[in-house]
Amino acid sequence: MVDDHPMIIEGYQNTLLATKKEHQHLDIDIANDCDIANELIKKSAKSEPYDICFFDIKLPPSKDGLITSGEDLAKVARLYLPNAKVVILTMFNESFRIHNIIKEINPEGLLIKSDLTSSELAEAFQLILDNPPYYSSTVKGFVNSTISSDLHLDDINRKILHLLSQGIKTKSLREHIDLSMSAIEKRKKQLKLLFDVEDGKDETLLTEARNKGFL
């Protein structure tokens, strides 16, 4: 967990430790700046890789100036810990910033701090572990309001929609798209969030995509 406010990290820790499931054991390392976080990420990659990384966006930069934010740390984590789930927690709630984080990092969790309660953090943690991504309410609102933006519907997502519309089953998408099945499933879930599909059905996703001119 990386945040430059110790009390915030303490709150996160206390919430997760108090609400973890019986079979879960949590070992939590903390960092308050980019240098310490960068060191911990690389150390973890050589021994026991982290399962999940929480990054605040606004952080004291590294001494060499190469890592200046939680976004930069998330990219380091993607490089050194490819299997770790990345969660971004931030006070920034501007539409462009949210969209940029999704585009550049594609985090398993994106939470606006003003949305968070202890119960939502606990719920988000479990969902991110089992079935990411998880977006807090402000993020969902911005994503839904910019549904037609190419910033989100990139070429791969468009191809997924096209293949599904042609009757290709999800299990066969890997034959047409150079992604792992987990990555494809994650993109499908994000598409359903983008198109506000509440019943989770592919048919509904395709209907909404057609209605908005994507098919």
Image (tube, rainbow, N blue to C red):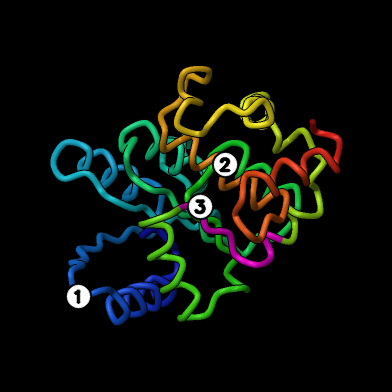
Mark 2: secondary structure: helix
Where does the image place residue 46, in percent across and percent down from the top left?
Answer: 16, 36
- Magenta segment: does it hold 15? no
Q: In this figure, which residue is indicated by the disc labeled 1?
A: 22
Q: In this figure, which residue is indicated by the disc labeled 2?
A: 188
* Farthest-out residue, left: 47
Q: Amino acid at mark 3?
A: Pro
- Seen in the picture, residue 190 relative to 181 is either above or below; the reply is below
The magenta span reads 132-140
| 102 left or right, relative to 38 | right
Q: In this figure, which residue is indicated by the disc labeled 3?
A: 133
Can residue 153 be seen at all in this image of the molecule?
Answer: yes
Residue at (16% x, 45% y) in the render: 48
| 97 left or right, relative to 32 | right
Q: Amino acid at mark 2?
A: Lys
* Mark 2 and mark 3 residues within 8 Å of each other at the beta carbon: no
Distance between the alpha carbons at the discs numbered 1 and 2: 31 Å
Which class describes the residues within 10 Å of circle 3: few (<14), some (14-19), or many (20+)? many
- 1 or 2: tag closer to the N-terminus: 1
